[in-house]
Image (cartoon, rainbow, N blue to C red):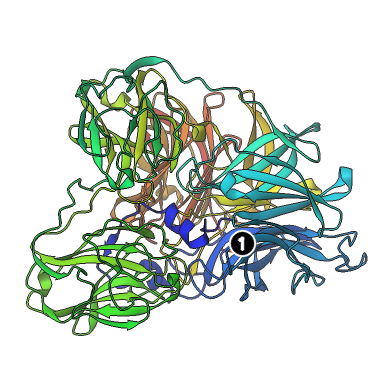
Amino acid sequence: MSRVRISRQARMRMATAVTVCALSAAPLTPGAVAADAPAYTETYRPQFHFTPQKNWMNDPNGLVYHQGEYHLFYQYNPNGNSWGDMSWGHAVSKDLVHWEELPLALAHDDEEMVFSGSAVVDRDNTTGFGTKENPPMVAIYTSAYRDGGKQAQSLAYSTDRGRTWTKYQGNPVIDIGSRDFRDPKVQWYAPTKSWLMTVSLSAEHKVLFYSSKNLKDWELQSEFGPAGAAGGVWECPDLFPLAVDGDEKNIKWVLVVNLNPGGIAGGSAAQYFVGDFDGKKFTPEDKGTYTPPTGDVVQDFEGAGFGDWTATGTAFGGGPATGALDGQGTVSGFDGKGLANSFHGGDGATGSLTSPSFTVTSPYLNFKIGGGRHPHQAGTVLDGTPPEGTVLADFEGGTYGGWTATGDAFGTAPATGTLPGQQQVSGYLGSGLVNTFRNGDSTTGTLTSPEFTVDKKHINFLIGGGNHPAGSANPTSVELLVDGQVVRSTTGKDSEALNWASWNVGDLAGKKARIRIVDDNTGGWGHVNVDHVVMSDNPAQRVSQETSVNLIVDGKVVRSATGTDSETLDWASFDMRPFAGKTAQIQILDMNTGGWGHVLADRFTAAGKPAESVVQRADWADYGKDYYAAVSWEDAPGGKRYMIGWMNNWDYGQSVPTSPWRGVQSVPREMALRTVDGRIRLTSKPVGPLESLRRANPAKASGVTVASTTKSLSGLGAKGKALDIEATFSLKDADRFGLKVRTGAGGEETVIGYDTAGQELYVDRSRSGAGDFSSTFPGVQTAPLKAENGKVRLRILVDWSSVEVFGGRGEAVITDQIFPDPSSTGVEVFAEGGTATLDNLRAWQLKSIWR
C-alpha cells in the first residue's frame, strides 16, 4: 500500500524530511476557495480521472472484474482530507472510464485500519463464504493494528457483488509478527489449482510468495529481493503473465514492485522486473553486470588528506574516511580505500568540501554519492544566523511566558526537541521550541501571543510540521491577527526540519497584532513546530539543509545530486555540456543536522558518457513523479491486463492544493510486453473506451515546421483544460522540440518535449501553475525514448490537474500532476536550437465523466 509509514506517521516524516516552509500571505489556498464550487467542477477537479467526491484517497485496492463490473477499491479516509483512519472506499465501472462511487466497503475500527490488498472471485467457493451458485467476492487486505503497529493479512467477503462486506472471524490468516508486512495481491494459479499471494516485506525490500487451497491456510513458497531499486520501502507488489510481442507461446511474468522513496523521478514510483515464475519462485531476467564509462579521475580520495580541496566545518574531518565512522552503519559501494564522509561527529556536524576551480572540458562528470536524501534548494543560504530585531518569543527558559495556550497540543511548556514517536526534529535554535506532537498527532489547541505593535517591516520565524494551511479544514499554521482577523498565515511542509518563513508587514505599521499558533488537525502530519519569532527590518532567508554534491558555475549551483538515505554509494552524473569552457567548482555540502544529515562521495571522473545509477538502470512502469501503488485487475475480459496507479507522490501528496478531495487515480492502462531495442519492456496505453469521451471535430495540424521558436495552435482549435492529443514529429536539427499545453496566465506552461541528443522524452512542470507547496514539486522528468524511423510519436492526456504522456509504442510514459490557472488553456508547438516538423496533430477536447 502506498501508505505513509515505517511506523505510519514516522514514514510520512521521513519521506519529506527536507521540505522547507513556504509563505502564504492569503488565508485560503486555491483548493480551499474552489471547494465552494459545485461538486466535480472545483478548480483542479479531474474530469476523466476517478476521484472521490470528498476526502483523502491513495492506493488502488481490490481490483477485480465481476458480473460486468470493474471494481475499484481504494485507500480512503472517511473522516478527512489527509491520510488517516484508512478504510476501503469503493467505485464500479462498466468501461473503466465512467465511475460510480459506492458507499464505504471496509471500514477501520478501534482495533485496526484496513490497509491495501486485493480481491478475487472465489468461483469454486473454496472458502465456504458463499455457494458455487453464488460465489463470494473475497478481499485480502492488510490489518494494520493500532495497538503495537503490527501488520498481518486478513479476509473479508461479500455475496452481493461487493456492496456489503463481512470480516472473517478467523483473521488474521497470515501473521509473521512484523510491522512492515503488507499489500497482498492474490490470484488463482491454475496449474496447481491453488491461490497465489504476492506480498511485501517492505523494509527488507523483499516480496514473499504464498500458496493456499482455501484463502485461509497459507504456506510460504519463496521470496524475491532485494533487487533493482531499493532506496525506499517496497510496497504494493503485483505479479502477472503477459505474452511477449503478442506471441502466446512466449509468456513472461512481470513482477511490479512499488518503491517509496527512491523512484526514478524522486519520491514514489512503480518499478518492474520481467522473468519466469514456476508456481513457487520468480526468477528475473539476467541483465548482466554494470561497468561505468571510463574517464579521467579528478578526485578519488585515496590520499592521506583532501589534497587541494578545501574543507570547512567539522563534518568531513581532516581527511578521507576509510569506511564507516563511529556510530555509523556499514558503508559500502565506494572505490578503493578512501571516500569523503561527513559523519564525523555524527549527523549534528556540518561543513563543506570544495574543489579548486577548473575549466569544463568533458561532457560529463561522474561520481559516487550516498548518505542523506536532502536535496539542494534554490534560494537557500548557508548562513543560518537569525536576523536582528525584537524577539517576540524564543521559547527558552521552560515556559511560554505571556503566551496563552488552549487545548492539549502545546502541553504546559515548550518542548526541548523531538517528542516520543516523532521523527527527529531539527533546525530550531537553543533548547526550546513549540512542538504540538504531544500524544502524536491526536492533540489540538492554540497558542496566542500577547498583543504587540507592528513597528518593523518583517516578522520572521522558524516553522516545520504539517502542511494544513489556515482557512482550510483543520489547519496547522502560524497566523497574524489584526483586529481579530487573520491577515497573514504560514503552514509547514510535512517536514520536521524547521526553516525560516517571513511576512512583509510594512503595510501594518503601527497596528496592534497578535500571533496565534494553531493545531486543529488530528490526521497525518497533524502538528506544527515553531521557534524564534522575531520582528526585524530585514526578511529572514531560508537556510540550506542539504546533503549534496553541487556543481558551481559563475557562483551559482547549476547541477546538484543527493543521497537516498543509504550508506551504499551509487553512481550519479552531471551533464557538463552546457558549461563547456566555463570555470567551475565541485562542492560537497553537509548542512543538515537531522536524521540522515550526512553525505558520502567518491570517484569524481571526467568522462565522455554519463554513468547510470541503480535507479536509472532499473525498469519503470512510469517515469513521472505521480504514478504509484500501481496494480492490475484480475479476471478482466479477454485476458486483458489493465493497470491503474495512484496519481500522486508521498513527497508532497498531503500538500497538493485540492479540496474537498485529495487524491486521484491515473487513467487505467492496457499493459503489454514488447521487444524494444532487443530487450523486453513493459508498455502501456490508455484503455480504448477513453476515446468515447472525445468530442467531435478535433483540431488538426500537419506539416508545421518550427525553427527555434514557439507557435500557438489555439487558432486551429487546439486548446482546452481536458484534451486527448495525438502528435507525430520528424527529427531534423533541433536540440529539443515538442508541445506546450495549459499555456496562458503569467507565462504558465507545461512543456512536453523530446531531447534529440539525450534521446529522451521529458515533461517540464516548473512553470505549470501552483507548485510552491513543496520544493520537490517543480522540475523536469525524463524517460528514455529512441526515435523510430526518424519519427517521435506522442499520445498526451491533459486533464484539469494532470498530464499523462505516452511516447513511442508506450515504452516511455510520464505522469505528472499540474495545477495551472483555469484560464491557461493554450497549446503550442516549439523547437529549440534548430528546426523540427510537426507532421500530424489531432487534439480532441474531452467530455467530463461526471456530467
Residue at image coords 29%, 19%: 303
Give the percent coordinates (x, y) of residue 678.
Answer: 64, 23
Is residue 687 visible to the viewer in this orientation of the structure?
no
Is disc 1 placed on a helix, strand or loop? loop
Above or below, 157 relative to 582? below
In the picture, residue 146 is in which quadrant? bottom right
Total marks placed: 1
The answer to whether residue 362 is visible is yes
| Nearer the observer, 738 or 21 | 21
Q: What x and y, as percent, mark residue 798?
A: 50, 52
Between 572 and 241, the one lying in front of the other is 572
Residue 565: name its quadrant.
top left
Which residue is depicted at the point 20% across and 22% down? Answer: 308
Viewport quadrant of the N terminus: bottom right
Give the left or right position of residue 561, taking residue 543 as reference.
right
Residue corresponding to mark 1: 150
Q: Quadrant of the C terminus?
A: bottom right
Residue at position x 45%, y 74% in the image: 442
- Residue located farthest toward the front when viewing the structure as drawn: 326
**Residue type indicated by callout 1:** Lys
List x then y, in percent, for residue 531.
24, 65
Q: Nearer the viewer, residue 836 or 663?
A: 663
Using residue 373 as the reference point, say whether residue 134 is left or right of it: right
